[in-house]
Amino acid sequence: MKTPSKTAKFDTSKSIKRAKTARKKRADWSIKGRNEEYVWSNKLERVSIIRKGLPYESIELVSKRMGLPVKQLLTLLGVPQTTYNKKKREKELLSGRDSEVILLLTELIDFGTEVFNNELEKFQRWLKKPNVSLGGVKPDSLFDSVTGIQEVKNALNRLEYGNMA
């Protein structure tokens, strides 16, 4: 006797339509903070935002989108929980390095979601599984450096174009 499958049948045409729609929308990146939205569409605009700094609350926004606990993202950034709580409460801004990492992670989330046909949950699962093309480490363990984030993006590129990832 067969047991019913709990996995939904994959609808190729629906997935292709969703991917096309997502690609049309993705012209730039944004992250919300306090009372403003930070938007950039190229590296020079990103540098301008990095120099100004992002609010500490942006850490929480990125952690939610990545499916990571805030504490894990704080560890990757090297920011103690008490410092985060204090600076968030006082509405201070992140350092340039931490702002850059948050912006790069925002771009990575958008790209990863696009690679996984606009399905954020699938991308979040992929981040937590060991990856052969990354030397067997979990992609989310590489978020502590700009180079690590770039390597995860390279793995997503390989995956998008049919190479092993």
Image: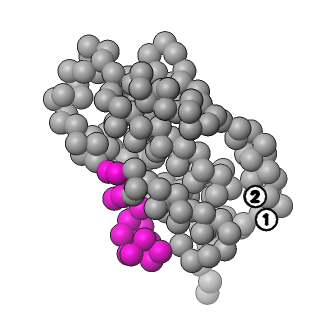
Residue 142 in the image, given as x and y percentages of width and height: 36, 58
46 with respect to 34 (left or right)? right
Identify the residue position indicated by label 2 in the image. Answer: 15
Q: Nearer the viewer, residue 5 or 78?
A: 78
Residue 98 rendering spot, x and y as whole percentages: 34, 36
Dot 1 and dot 2 residues touching (CB under 8 Å): yes
Q: Residues within 10 Å of mark 2 (few under 14, many from 20)?
A: some
Q: Is residue 163 visible?
A: yes
Q: Please, what is the three-letter code of the amino acid marked with disc 1? A: Thr
**Image spot of residue 101 (x, y percent):** 40, 41
Identify the residue at the far bottom of this view: 1
Q: Three-letter amino acid code at disc 2?
A: Ser
In the displayed structure, 107 sits above or below 133; it is above
Is 82 placed above or below 156 here?
above
Range of residues picked out in magenta: 129-145
- The residue shown at (32%, 44%) is 73
Mark yes or no: residue 18 visible.
Answer: no
Seen at 16% across and 29% down, the residue is 82
Could you tell me how far apart the alpha carbons at marks 1 and 2 are, in whole angstroms?
Answer: 5 Å
Tag 1 residue: 12
Element assignment for label 2:
helix
Please tell me which residue is depicted at 52% across the width and 49% down the height of the picture.
108
Disc 1 packing (10 Å; few <14; some 14–19; many ≥20): few
Would you say 98 lies left or right of 2 here?
left
Colour basis: one colour
Q: Nearer the viewer, residue 51 or 40?
A: 51
Tell me the quarter of the picture where residue 100 sits.
top left
How far across and how far down the image is residue 156, in percent? Answer: 56, 62
State the image quarter where residue 61 is shown: top left
Residue 120 drawn above or below residue 55: below
| Magenta-span inclusion, residue 153 | no
